[in-house]
Image (cartoon, helix red, strand yellow):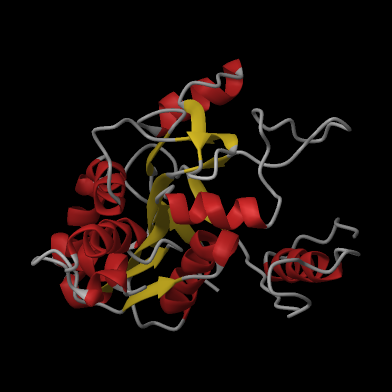
Amino acid sequence: MDRIYLSRPGMVCCAGASAEECFDAAVKGSQRGIQEARLKDGRVFRAGWVPAVFPRLKNIAAAALAQMSGDIERARLRWGARRVGVCAGSCDNGSEESLRAHDAYFSLGAFPPDYRISAQSASGIAEWIASAYRLEGPCLTAATACASSAGAVVKGKELLEAGVCDAVLAGGADLLSPTVLSGFSALEALSPEITNPFSKNRQGITLGEGAAFFVLSREPPPGPRPLAALLGAGESADAFHMTAPRPDGSSAALAMRRAFAQAVIAHFVV
């Protein structure tokens, strides 16, 4: 199997508007961008939003993709638009559009004239990216909850290995909407304070929105040395519960074993 290389990422989230800013925030333990989120029933949580200049899913994705437009154009010119695919992970499915439309319907008795049900299609984000960057290869969306973006990268890898594509724009974007907050609140998964992982005092998670993308290819990107290579990937689906994994972690361990086996990394025990 040829080695698959990753370009520098384009990314944005509440911690920063670039990979460098996000890394700096992680090193410093910054909690910038995490704000109060209040549901209609009065419950209060903490959540991470990107700056208000990026209020919609497509704008969040566009902010990340703009950082790597040179890499995308280089791939399109190098291999041709039909040989460059798009694999995007997202769970939003146009919730901001549906919320806006339904608020109008309940208050005015009619949907806004510019509302289309197609805005709620899971394929919307990938189709928009392909159109914006004039890419004509396979166009796929992964919507598998928290694994969506990882699944999109794995699918991009498989398209390269199968010879279907010479490059794939892969990654994901998600929006933090009232629907998402209400759903995770119903699961009793949200923390009223900023999340405190690996602590006996933890109370739940802190949700956040953002986007990150890479160009995957079998050729190293320009530069003195490649930033990263994707050596292997593993997936599993235990169907144990609608929202919960197996308590013993066996399915997660299986995915990791498969990834390490594919990458030919032997020193791993689970």
- Please state the horizontal and vertical placement of residue 202, each as a whole percent of the image: 79, 34
- Report the residue at 58% width, 34% height from top: 44
Say which of 110 and 228 sits in front: 110
Name the residue at the top extreme.
Answer: 28
- Report the residue at 86% width, 56% height from top: 267
In the picture, the quarter occupied by the N terminus is bottom right
Q: To which quarter of the image does residue 98 belong? A: bottom left
Say which of 11 and 158 sits in front: 11
Q: Name the side, left or right, on which 161 lies relative to 85.
A: right
Say which of 221 and 12 sits in front: 12
In the picture, the quarter occupied by the C terminus is bottom right
- Report the residue at 44% width, 32% height from top: 14
Q: Is residue 205 above or below residue 83?
A: above
- Report the residue at 69% width, 74% height from top: 242
- Please state the horizontal and vertical placement of residue 45, each as a whole percent of the image: 59, 35
Q: Name the side, left or right, on which 105 lies relative to 162.
A: left
Q: Name the side, left or right, on which 169 lies relative to 148.
A: left
Q: Is residue 255 above or below residue 68?
A: below
Residue 205 shows in this picture:
yes
Say which of 259 and 14 sits in front: 14
- Please state the horizontal and vertical placement of residue 209, each as a whole percent of the image: 44, 44
Tally the marks: 0
Name the residue at the left extreme.
Answer: 113
- Please state the horizontal and vertical placement of residue 220, each as a whole percent of the image: 39, 53
Residue 133 shows in this picture:
no
Q: Is residue 194 above or below residue 81?
A: above
